[in-house]
Amino acid sequence: MIAHLPEIDNAIRRAARLIKAARKAVVLTGAGFSTPSGIPDFRSPGSGLWTRYLPMEVASLTTFRYDPEKFFAWLRPLASHMLSAEPNPAHLALAELENAGFIKAIITQNIDLLHQRAGSKNVIEVHGTFNSLTCVSCYKQYSSAGFMDSYIEKGDIPRCPDCHHLLKPDIILYEEQLPQRMWMRAKKFSSTCDLMLVAGTSLEVMPSASLPVKALDNGAHLIVVNQSPTFIDERADLLFPKDVADIIPRIATEIFGG
Ligand SMILES: [Zn+2]
């Protein structure tokens, strides 16, 4: 059912009841979870990052390899947004629910670390992380922290202090495979959960979009909170076509108060 006002309070209560009754609730988040924190969805038209470059073209392994200046110039405003952003009320509510045992895992397509900064522990980053960089030549891994100031302020491309080759952020680019260990965990949690909350993702990017199908195949309940439609809406027990920063804290309040 689609939750329209005034039925929305009722739907919030039903969502809270489903999550409380679940033994293994798992959350899948995407770009829409971080837009209330001011991080643009780089796949969305009008985000500013789209207008200059096609993401599929620039956020690719090919561009990184053959035109790293272009790649790092494109990534720079996104990196700046990510480092200055703060977790929003939806991030904080999920962390509280996880710490209280209502949620077992958060599978995220985001690379911005906001779930962790909000206090979430079991975060499965299927698209990698912006927290570290790896040398393309010697494969030594570095924390991003030491490189970000000069990159964001001056545009200095991060290079390996040992061998001076490029450092690649540990984010998954187009043409790249998902990190196997993370992806196996994501699949395992999805195919064994009894409730999945899909929040802030339009499920347009494969293979992450297949995860809710695995949950449904296991007989899990499905709750969708996303402002635009997803292909799986009609199979959801509850559908909130709304901002995550509005809905998720209200569900959490209901769970803790009800
Ligand atoms: Zn190196």
Image: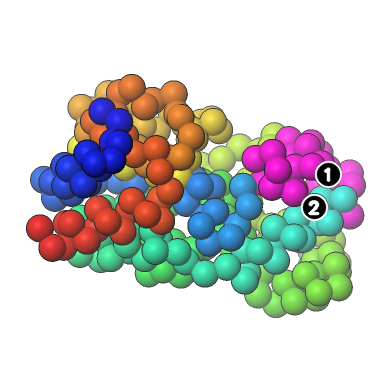
What percent of the width, then of the height, locates residue 188? 33, 39
Q: Which residue is mark 2?
A: 74
Which one is closest to the eye, mark 2 or mark 1? 1
User: Which of the four quarters of the rendered structure image does ligand 1 lie in?
Assistant: bottom right
Whether the residue under disc 2 has CB within 8 Å of ligand 1: no
Judged left or right of residue 101, residue 235 is: right
Q: Nearer the viewer, residue 105 or 234?
A: 234
Disc 1 marks a residue whose amino acid type is Arg
Quadrant for residue 148, please give it.
bottom right
C-beta proximity under 8 Å, tags 2 and 1: yes
> What is the number of the mark on residue 52?
1
Number of residues whose C-alpha sits closer than 10 Å to that of mark 2, classed few (under 14), some (14–19) or many (20 or more): some
Secondary structure state at the residue bearing disc 1: helix
Tell me where the magenta segment starts and ends, as one range.
42-69
Number of residues whose C-alpha sits closer than 10 Å to that of mark 1, classed few (under 14), some (14–19) or many (20 or more): few
Tell me, yes or no, whether the highlighted magenta stretch contains residue 62. yes
Q: Is residue 162 visible?
A: no
Quadrant for residue 44, please give it.
top right
What percent of the width, then of the height, locates residue 126? 50, 46
Tell me, yes or no, whether the highlighted magenta stretch contains residue 126. no
What percent of the width, then of the height, locates residue 225? 37, 41
- Looking at the image, which residue is at 51% across and 57% down? 36
What percent of the width, then of the height, locates residue 139? 70, 58
Judged left or right of residue 185, residue 209 is: right
